[in-house]
Amino acid sequence: MKIAISGKGGVGKTTFAANLAHYLSERGMRVLAVDADPDASLGTVLGIAEDDLNRLRPIVDMKELIEQRMGGSGAFYPLNPQVDDILDDYSVQVGPIRFFRMGNVKGGGTACYCKENSFLHALVNSLILSEQDTVILDMGAGIEQLTRGTAQGVDVLVIVTEASTVSAHTVRVIQKLAQELGIPKVSVIGNKIRSSKDEDFLKAQFTEDELFGLIPFSEELLDMSIHTDNSSFPKGAPGSQLESVYRKLMEGRDI
C-alpha cells in the first residue's frame, strides 16, 4: 500500500506520517518512510539520530549521480532514468522502518531544479510501482509537489488539516489536484482539535465520506515531535484516537 501525506504547513502532517509508520511497523508490516518535504524533518520525528541523518545525503544533492543517470549535464535529459537500485544504497534503517530522504531546498539565486525534479519524479514512481513495502510519502507543505505529479500512483492521499478557514481552503485545492491526478482514495484528517467548536467547523466543511477522523490536540504527541528518542507509537489516550483513525484509513485495503 502506498500512502501520501499532504496538507498546509504546520498542521502536523509529519507527526501524523511518523506515527503511522510506527503503527504499521509494530503490526509486522515492512514500512518505507519517504521524506519528500524540502524541510526534511520526518527523519528527526521518527527518532533517527542526527549523526545518521547528516550522513544520509539527499538525492538532489548528488550532482554526479543525477548527471550520470540523466545522461550528462546538458539541457536535454531523459524523463525515465534508471533508479531502481538507489533505494538500498541511500536509505537508513530505524528499527523495522527504512527511511529515505528525497531532497532539500535549493539556495536562493541558484539554477532551477528541473533535472533534479525529473529524477525525483522517476524515483517516486519507481517506489510506487515496484516497492513491496508499505510506502509512506511525507509530501511538502501545500500543493507544489502535487502539481509536479509526484503523488501519481499512490493508493491513498491523506490530507491533514486544522480547524481554520485557510487550512480548509488548502484541502479543497489539494482535493481538486488529486482528482485530476486520478488518485483513487482521498481522506481528510482533522488534527489538533481543541474544542467542540473545532469539530463542528470541520464537520461543516467536509462530508462524512471526506472526513475520516478527528485527532485531539495532545501534549504527548507534541512532546514526541520535539523530544524524539526513537519511541514507538504512543499507548495512551491520544494513541487510541490515532489508532481509530489508522484502522479506518486501512479498512478494505489489501495490505
Image (tube, rainbow, N blue to C red):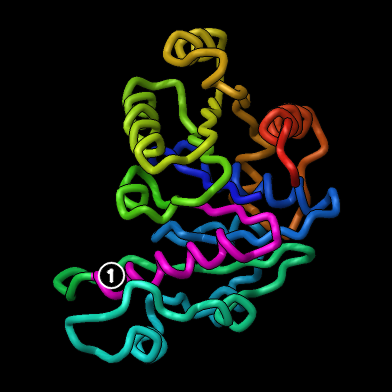
- Which residue is at the front of the view, 144 or 125? 125
**Does the image show residue 197?**
yes
Q: With 95 as the anchor, is 206 left or right in this view?
A: left
Q: Judge the density around disc 1: few (<14), some (14-19), many (≥20) Cα neighbours within 10 Å.
A: few
**To which quarter of the image does residue 80 belong?**
bottom left
- Residue 125 lies within the magenta run: yes
x and y percent of residue 74 in the render?
19, 87
- Which residue is at the front of the view, 89 or 80? 80
SS majority, magenta: helix
Magenta span: 113-138
- Which residue is painted at 41% across and 88% down in the image? 65
- Which residue is painted at 50% across and 34% down in the image? 160
Asked if residue 196 is positioned above or below residue 222 in the image, the reply reads above
**To which quarter of the image does residue 61 belong?**
bottom left
x and y percent of residue 213 in the render?
62, 23
- Which residue is painted at 68% across and 46% down in the image? 19
x and y percent of residue 111 in the render?
17, 75
The residue that disc 1 covers is 106
**Does the image show residue 12?**
no
- Which residue is at the front of the view, 249 or 182? 182
- Which residue is painted at 76% across and 54% down in the image? 231
Kind of residue at disc 1: Lys
Asked if residue 242 is positioned above or below residue 75 in the image, the reply reads above
Asked if residue 36 is positioned above or below residue 8 in the image, the reply reads below
- Residue 73 lies within the magenta run: no
Q: Which residue lies furthest to the left in this view?
A: 109
Q: With 134 as the anchor, is 120 left or right in this view?
A: left
Describe the element under mark 1 as helix, strand or loop.
loop
